[in-house]
């Protein structure tokens, strides 16, 4: 063996000895950082959040709902960057506040569904027996309910009767609350099954038995040991669920049964645009459609990256 080869082997050995082993969190971060499409998704979603958050500060609700019949159906210009709609409202301002509504619906419905799914799945697996049987049969019954159908029915009969909600000085139609509750209440079942499967394996671990022998309560074991060790599955499911929630909101709002005017959402903006597609007012439907597509694409890319990052068997990015 040559002296150069020996020196190289010694240098590699020193590096391996000096460098501490990576923690699970560092491994997850490394896998995710090397997933290029996920990084692009993060960048795109970050820019979208910047557009909505900064825009909401600079552009008020009043500006988004301000009617100017003299400027109706104006194409994009220096005064109205994305043109105006059939009543002269500025589409750029409505895109900002419509995106705010879409993300609020998405995030709150996901928080709702994740909370319910994690608790139901975890409790069913931890206690087992009749508790597991009852909760899983209830979960299967909920799976048989078509969420979009329920959302459409409740939106039609309840959405217009719920009073306007004011939060931090911003007014939202009461239909926003209906959409959030229905999407959240009909999308937790898949996560509950995933959490149940993980907890079934985790509850047999030695550290759970040690916690029980030391007198730890069931609540402490559940929330300090079991749920934190299923966070990978919960995070991935939440990310992909966010895309589905935004898409469902846009779908029912497009049908006129979701978020009701004057509150703007990307879905009901498309509803307003469909009567003017053949009149050449392309800007009324292009911008909401484009933002919906970009948002869903970015979230799905992030979800794919997180799924690979949390997979302990994934070694392609190490």
Image (cartoon, helix red, strand yellow):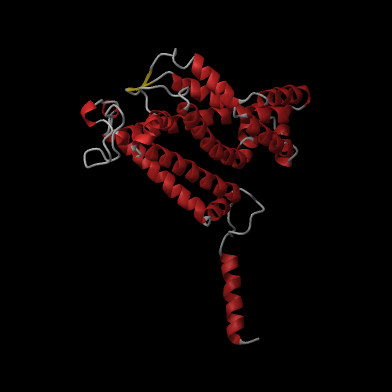
Residue 183 placed where, x, y %? 54, 26
Image quadrant where one finds the N terminus: bottom right
Residue lying at 28% horizontally and 39% vertically, measured from the top left: 75
Residue 296: percent from left, percent from top:
49, 41
Q: Is residue 133 left or right of residue 95?
A: right
Is residue 143 visible from the viewing direction of this image?
A: yes
Question: In the shown orientation, is residue 295 left or right of residue 70?
Answer: right
Q: Determine the residue located farthest toward the right in the rendered image.
A: 129
Give coordinates of residue 115: x percent, y percent.
57, 28
- For residue 2, side relative to residue 58 (left or right): right
In the picture, the quarter occupied by the C terminus is bottom right
Front residue (pair 303, 297)? 297
In the figure, residue 194 lies in which quadrant?
top right
What residue sits 57% from the left and 75% below the top?
11
- Looking at the image, is 294 positioned above or below residue 174? below
Q: Nearer the viewer, residue 303 or 253?
A: 253
Q: Position of residue 78 (x, y in %)?
A: 22, 42
Residue ID at (57%, 54%): 27
Count up the numbered dots.
0
Q: Pick the residue in front: 234 or 246.
A: 246
Q: Kindly identify the residue that appears in the image at 35 percent across and 39 percent down.
A: 282
**Measured along the vertical axis of the image, is residue 11 above or below residue 205?**
below
Q: Spot the residue most to the bottom.
A: 2
Residue 216 visible within the image: no
Q: Residue furthest front?
A: 278
Compare residues 309 and 93 and report the one nearer the observer: 93
């Amino acid at each position: 063996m040559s002296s150069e080869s020996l020196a190289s082997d010694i240098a590699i050995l020193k590096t391996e000895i000096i460098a501490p082993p990576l923690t699970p969190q560092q491994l997850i971060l490394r896998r995710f950082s090397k997933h290029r499409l996920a990084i692009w998704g993060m960048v795109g979603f970050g820019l979208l959040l910047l557009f909505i958050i900064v825009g909401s500060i600079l552009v008020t609700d009043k500006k988004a709902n301000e009617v100017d019949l003299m400027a109706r159906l104006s194409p994009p210009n220096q005064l109205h960057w994305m043109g105006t709609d059939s009543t002269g409202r500025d589409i750029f301002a409505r895109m900002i506040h419509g995106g705010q509504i879409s993300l609020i619906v998405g995030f709150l419905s996901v928080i709702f569904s994740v909370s319910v799914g994690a608790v139901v799945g975890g409790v069913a697996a931890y206690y087992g027996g009749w508790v597991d049987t009852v909760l899983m049969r209830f979960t299967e019954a909920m799976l048989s309910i078509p969420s979009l159908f329920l959302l459409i029915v409740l939106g039609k009969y309840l959405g217009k009767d719920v009073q306007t909600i004011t939060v931090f000085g911003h007014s939202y139609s009461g239909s926003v609350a209906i959409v959030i509750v229905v999407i959240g209440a009909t999308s937790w079942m898949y996560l509950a099954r995933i959490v149940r499967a993980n907890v079934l394996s985790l509850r047999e671990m030695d550290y759970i038995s040690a916690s029980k022998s030391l007198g730890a309560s069931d609540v402490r074991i559940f929330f300090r040991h079991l749920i934190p060790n299923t966070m990978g599955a919960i995070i991935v499911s939440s990310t992909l669920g966010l895309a589905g929630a935004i898409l469902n909101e846009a779908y029912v709002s497009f049908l006129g049964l979701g978020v009701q005017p004057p509150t703007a959402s990307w879905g009901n903006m498309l509803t307003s645009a469909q009567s003017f597609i053949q009149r050449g007012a392309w800007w009324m439907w292009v911008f909401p459609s484009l933002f919906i597509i970009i948002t869903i694409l970015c979230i799905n890319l992030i979800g794919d990256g997180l799924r690979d990052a949390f997979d302990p068997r994934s070694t392609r990015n190490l």
